[in-house]
Amino acid sequence: MKYLVTPIIVGLFLLGGCLTTAQKENEVAGSKDLDWPTYGGNHAGNRYSPLTQINRENVHQLQLAWTYDTGENKNPEERAMNLQCQPIVVKGILYGTTPQMKLFAVKAATGEPLWKFDPFANPEREPRFHPLRGVMYWEDGADQRVLYTVGSFLYALDANTGKPITTFGKHGMVDLHEGLGGEETLGHEVSNLSIRVTTPGVIYKDLLITGSSVSEAGDAPPGYIRAFNVRTGKLAWVFHTIPLPGEFGYDTWSEDAYRKLGGANCWAGMVLDEKRGVVYAATGSPSVDFYGGARHGKNLFANCVIALDAETGERKWHFQTVHHDLWDRDLPCPPNLLTVQHEGRKVEAVAQATKDGYVFLFDRDTGTPLFEVKEVPVPTTPALPGEQPWPTQPVPTKPAPFAIQELTEENITDRTPEAHAYVLERYRNSLHGSKYMPPSLEGSLYFAFGGGAEWGGNAADPEGILYLNANNMLWWLQMRDIREQNQQSVTSRGASLFNANCSVCHGMGGKGSGGSNAAQAYPVLTEVGKRMTRAQISELLETGRGRMPSFQHISQENRDHIIDFLLHTEKKPADELHRTMPEVAYSGEDEFPYIPPFLNNGNIQFRDQDDYPAIKPPWGTLNAIDLNTGDYVWQVPLGEYPALTEQGIPPTGTENHGGPIVTAGGLVFIAATYDEKLRAFDKDTGKIVWEYQLPAGGFATPVTYMVDGKQYIVIAAGGTRYGLKPGGSYVAFALP
């Protein structure tokens, strides 16, 4: 029989069973064991636990129970990796991943190691480093499997030994390029393009359903949602998020756009309604970010909540939250399934939070918004040549936005007179106003490139309250016309290749955009040779790491030219000079990779001269929203800057990455912040009732479970964000 939790817990996880919440929690409280069997805690993705052993009255007694040290992120000569994993717990065993993407199993009560699997132990497997936020579990009797993705390969391992299931795919691996099409369908090869899975999919019966993370530039493969047989690894179905000719939504793109554009991918995860047999997925933006001249139209199914038949992949309904996305407003986290009281009746609903601070709430069966959504006219000028911005955008009437919507002079920081003057000057010399202003050559200040909501996900309790953490961060976006740059200058081949493939993140010539490194989403590369060798740069281009994808689709010769350019070792004889881009790149023909005529300045977060956010606090918040009514229960700052606290400044909140969990014990647990603390909040009031200084930042989402009658809270402490120290441990807490 396949792995299932008890019927009591299944009903509770779906938050729609026949027992009352109190009855369910009383029965759970009498159990000695309760797992955290999936990413998000349950198929509904609610990050909710019915456990009450740790509660408001005793949480102050919480103490360190055990630590599991992965042994990684300790070598100062090696670049530290991300550790963003929310582990799972099944039958008293905790399964998680290390910063270097190994999969491990430990005893959930003690942290005692059981086994570890290294996907790169095979010399034929080249490392492809990227964030990993969770793993999956499936069983049928004695056949018990843990599944996860490394680079472009999906692995199935024996849950008891950590050894590959050799009957799954090829030697325990499935290549995730399968099902994307290729020369016959798309007109170009896909096997060398970057694809990985940062957030685990869901398992329905014998089907593993997954999205993917892909490039956001012109070399992006399509972000199709696919199902693989969990026993054999064989492809079961494909849903084309960029429709092919004859499919619904094809006419929302320029003709044959599917042949040269990618993205529209479900990178943030999905949830499952087992009773209905429906999977709910949230998709990201289409390529390329910030310019849509080659994809006129609404661009379905990018930026959508999509309900799919889990058995067949057939679309049941969809709702697009951003039409013709020009601002990289991916749906950044999985939906949440919950039950609400709406207009006097109980409704099983799906909630979706967005980067720009909205929560959309839909009827789970029909996709009808439970709170009215208005199509609001938005600016369409000034637009870049060739661009056709969509004239309206959907805005929910409730709940009110949980993040700042528009920059005004009143928003500008007043932390110090100098900081105010510094930001005010940029404000007066930039475009600002509606968050739907089309990107421009002049440059604009805007919110919601990095959230708003983020990938850590949100929590929901059986009462219909949604708990979500949010960011208020300001970004500086300026587009550049690379055709004009062609005409003005002649550059080397290495510079040409760098500007075509790398400058969208690192700025033209690797110079960034003039801000501090801390204010840039990607590092300045002008002196990269001082911190990396040629071999290390070559490996990075080949394998990728963190947010950077692999560039294996670029020939080795051209990668060598890029490295020569970065290390200032490039020869420039007159007969080898090349213009920045070939003119065919702008012809509108079915060229791949697609090179747009306009690129952005490198994804710059705008801060003041002291590296603090450029607006007034709060800079990060934790929110409780009653989705029965659409009203806020509370909103509080999340995190603090110790240096500002020492000056007597009240907690400002900080940028935060990671998510919350909520328990029947009346608590919300979350880390995620710059100050590297794990906190517990009273779920009714938002008051902090416990906090702990982690060994490194907890930029992940915690879990809670019970083994042998004891409840534990566990979080991955990986650090590395915001320039903080790295870490590589999992930290567990329990009552004495």
Image (tube, rainbow, N blue to C red):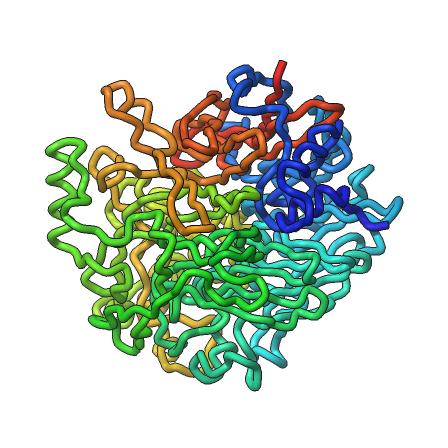
Q: Residue furthest right?
A: 142
Front in this rendered view, residue 53 or 613: 53
Instruction: Name the residue at the front extreme.
Output: 344
Foreground pick, 680 / 418? 680
Residue at figure coordinates x 45%, y 53% from the top left: 353
Q: Is residue 263 visible?
A: no
288 horizontally vs 170: left or right: left
Q: Quadrant of residue 580?
A: bottom left
Give me the residue at 45% from left, 67% from top. Answer: 320
Decide: is 298 above or below 204. below
Q: Residue 404: image x %, image y %?
A: 29, 49
**Compared with residue 329, is residue 66 higher up or lower down, i.e. above or below?**
above
> Closer to the camera, 43 or 560?
43
Image coords of residue 251 (percent x, y): 47, 83
Q: How many marks?
A: 0
Q: Left or right: 548 with respect to 291?
A: right
Residue 513 visible in the snapshot: yes
Place residue 114 in its image quadrant.
top right
Q: Which image quarter is the C terminus in?
A: top right
Q: Position of residue 58 (x, y in %)?
A: 55, 18
Q: Residue at x 45, y 35 (%)?
A: 672
Residue 562 x/y as whole percent: 42, 56
Is 570 displayed left or right of 420 in the figure? Answer: right
Left or right of 407 on screen, residue 80: right
Residue found at x 76% / y 24%: 708
